[in-house]
Image (tube, rainbow, N blue to C red):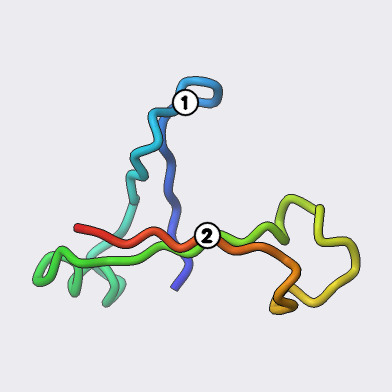
Amino acid sequence: NVVSFSDGLPGNGHGIPYFYLTTLDPTARNALKDARSSLTISEFPLGTCGQRDPENPTCSKLTLTGK
């Protein structure tokens, strides 16, 4: 699912992702029952992957996991 997230105001981030969810989405309801989660961010939206497929292994991805 796609959700909004931020780690602070531009130029003032602290590296802690904050998620903005609605309980109308099952993702939020599940998160309230089980705090474990993961977040994957792709390099593709930055435009640095060129014309490659976003699933191409040379287009970097970062996955964060935790509670």
User: In front here: 43 or 28?
Assistant: 43
Which residue extends farthest front? Answer: 58
The image quadrant where one finds the N terminus is bottom left
**Residue shown at the point (80%, 77%) measured from the top left:** 53
Decide: few, some or many residues near mark 1? Use Cα within 10 Å; few <14, some 14-19, many ≥20.
few
> Which residue extends farthest left?
33
Q: CA distance from mark 2 to mark 1?
A: 21 Å
- Which mark is in front, 2 or 1? 2
In the rendered structure, the answer to whether residue 42 lies left or right of residue 12 reads: right
Residue name at image x 45 percent, y 63 percent? 63
Query: Residue 59: x and y, percent?
Result: 73, 66
Q: Quadrant of residue 25?
A: bottom left
Q: Quadrant of the C terminus?
A: bottom left
Residue under numbered circle 2: 62
The crowd level at tag 2 (other Cα within 10 Å; few <14, some 14-19, many 20+) is few
**Residue at 31% from the left image edge and 57% from the top image edge:** 21
Q: 19 or 57, which lies in front?
A: 57
Location of residue 28 (image quadrant):
bottom left
Residue 9 image label: 1
Residue 27 in picture, x, y percent from top left: 29, 72
Which of the two labelled residues, at mark 2 and mark 1, occupies the earlier sequence position?
Answer: 1
Q: Secondary structure at mark 1?
A: loop
- Indicate the amino acid at tag 2: Leu
> In the shown orientation, is residue 67 left or right of residue 9?
left
Please tell me which residue lies in front, 27 or 23: 27
Inspect the image, locate mark 1, and give the three-letter code of the amino acid beneath it. Leu
Residue lying furthest top: 12
Q: Which mark is residue 57?
A: none
Horizontal and vertical percent position of residue 46: 73, 50
